[in-house]
Amino acid sequence: MQCDKCSREAIIYQPYSGMHLCSMHFTRDVETRAKREIRTHRWIRSGDVVGVALSGGKDSAAILHLLAGLLNERRDVELLAVTVDEGISGYRDPAVARRIAASEGVEWHCRSFAGEFGVTLDEVVARTGERRSCSYCGVLRRAVLNRAARDLGITRLALGFTLDDDAQTVLMNVLRGDAGRLLRSPDRQVPGVAPRIRPFRTVPEREVALYAHLHSEGFDLRGCPYSGTALRNDVRRLLNEYTHRHPSTPFALLRLEEELQAAGGGGAAVPVCPHCGEPAPGECRVCRIIEEVGGHV
Ligand code: SF4
């Protein structure tokens, strides 16, 4: 099949746009959309220190490559990579992320659950069971990234979140009946917390994966042994099946999210836990988990 923009061979078909694209026009399309998000949200400003949350998987390798290319010529913006080692044996290997950062010429830092809380995720699971592994992992990883950002002077944390991730999150919040999260803007300012930026939020996961395969190498393709327990997996299956028949559905969910967040007005100010320093709208989840599993903050 031929590219719809030139005479080269197409490498992908976008069902939602009806376009076949060659490698060059596909790359240009992904980068144009990511740059548009950055511009629209004013996500990167002069003086920023941008930290990429680099797990070593394809999405984070892709976002690092995009930002390294974009910020290469900028003398007024610094780019770092931060890896969080949750302590999951047979899965997380920080050396993978270190090599990816080195290949992009980006300074790399690593923090771990063991170093920050005195407990690995494997130990958390051994003490509390697998059912809540992803929810505990998410809370602790956010806290580690917030600490690393404060220590390293990071002003923006870049995540490799894709359109699929965003659409799944919206649907999960709907299924949980969590109006608070649906109305809360991810761009709101929380004292002591570097705002997250998600340049790939309008790019489908399969396209981010293809972008990574074209422009990055050595990323980790292994799956987390605890991922099978996540509600997100059920939602992913449901949404993929529906999107197969109705390709624009993830974009519709993204629009719904934006409209709800605009109506929600950004959400109330978030208090900070006096014990661990993390944002805690009610009971501090970081402290509760650490107390339950016998670690330290
Ligand atoms: Fe953590 Fe769950 Fe992701 Fe595994 S799948 S790294 S447990 S959030």
Image (cartoon, rainbow, N blue to C red):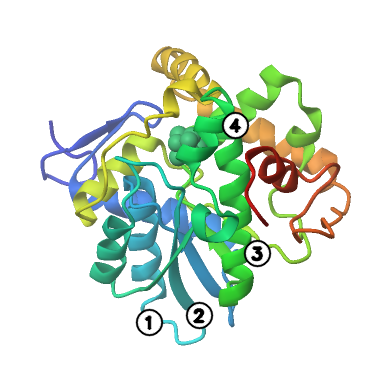
Q: Quadrant of the N terminus?
A: top left
Image location (x, y in percent) of residue 209:
30, 41
- Point out the tag, 3 or 1, that comes first from the N-terminus: 1
Residue appearing at x 62%, y 64% in the figure: 147
Identity of the amino acid at label 2? Val
Which residue has dot 1 on it?
Answer: 73
Q: Amino acid at mark 4?
A: Thr
Q: Secondary structure at mark 2?
A: loop
Task: Say few, some or many: other residues with alpha carbon within 10 Å of mark 1 (under 14 / 14 to 19 / 20 or more).
Answer: few
At horizontal 33% and vertical 33% (from top left) the residue drawn is 223
Find the distance from the CA under tag 1 to the CA under tag 2. Answer: 9 Å
Residue with the mark numbered 2: 77
Q: Which numbered disc flags the more N-terminal residue, 3 or 4?
A: 4
User: Mark 1 is on which residue type?
Assistant: Glu
Question: As shown in the figure, which amino acid type bears the numbered disc 3?
Answer: Ala
What residue would you read off at disc 3? 194
Quick check: can you spot residue 40?
Answer: no
Residue 211 point in image, percent of width and height: 28, 48
Which of pointers 1 and 2 indicates the residue nearer the eye? 2
The residue that disc 4 covers is 169
